[in-house]
Image (spheres, helix red, strand yellow):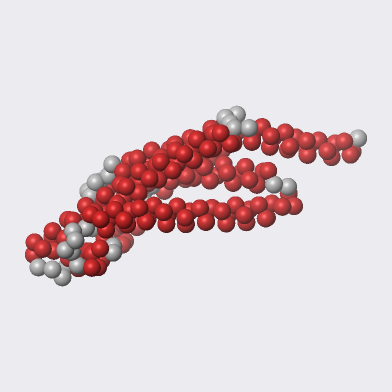
Amino acid sequence: GKSAMEAALWALLPSLPIGMAAPVATQLVQKGVNRAYVVTAGFAIGAVGYGMLALAGTDSLWLVLAACAVLSSGIVMVISQMTDLALGAAPAEQAGAASSLLETGSEFGGALGMATLGSIGTAIYRHDIPAGAPAPAHETLGGALAVAGQLPGRTGEALVTAAREAFTHGMQGAALAGAALLVLAGIAATATLRRVSVRAEAVQETEQARPEKVLA
């Protein structure tokens, strides 16, 4: 394991490609790519990230970092385009309400998703932990490592190994579930958003033409 500072520094690496995701998605839309396909691509990229995470083992640091970068980049692409779509479709006087509703929905969806995937991972972790392990070891990986430090020799080492493998299996199970959800979301995005951009552009052109008619 690594210290909190080391883990935080390693976690900064995926932020480099993440910062490029939103501008790339915006450029694709500006070049004429249907927004639905950009959103679907974001979901697909996120699913690939989850798939990479499902392949990670107990010592696959670089694979985990790469998976987080790919996953987060895909999600950022989706969020940026859905934000533009929601705010662009709302009348100017309701932009604040639309922004608040979008933020609330994003927070709720994120919390629900983390709770669901976390529950899946926790269930797998508790299933894989040896039945004879101390009670704290059945709760979290941190609890298992803390208890293992108090056990003698090979007993503690065996618990650490079992806990890390159980945690990895839980992460892999949650990642597979997340990948499946993103694939379904991508299919739904393609089906429902394909014509939204066209309708939004038509409405925008109509609203821009109104002042000209008044002035005429």
Measured from the top left, where is residue 31 in percent x and y? 59, 30
Is 53 left, or right, of 85 in this rendering?
left
Q: Of residues 64 and 182, which is closer to you in this image?
A: 182
Measured from the top left, where is residue 6 in percent x and y? 29, 58
Q: Of residues 29 and 188, which is closer to you in this image?
A: 188
- Depicted 72 relative to depicted 30: above or below: below
Q: Of residues 206 and 8, which is closer to you in this image?
A: 206
Quarter of image, res 150: bottom left
Q: In which quarter of the image is the N terminus?
A: bottom left
Taking the view exactly as shown, the residue that stands out farthest to the right is 216
Measured from the top left, where is residue 198 in percent x and y? 66, 32
Is 86 left, or right, of 111 in this rendering?
right
Residue shown at the point (59%, 32%) measured from the top left: 194
Residue shown at the point (85%, 36%) measured from the top left: 212
Residue shown at the point (13%, 68%) measured from the top left: 151
Is 160 left, or right, of 101 in this rendering?
left
Q: Quadrant of the C terminus?
A: top right
Taking the view exactly as shown, the residue that stands out farthest to the bottom is 150
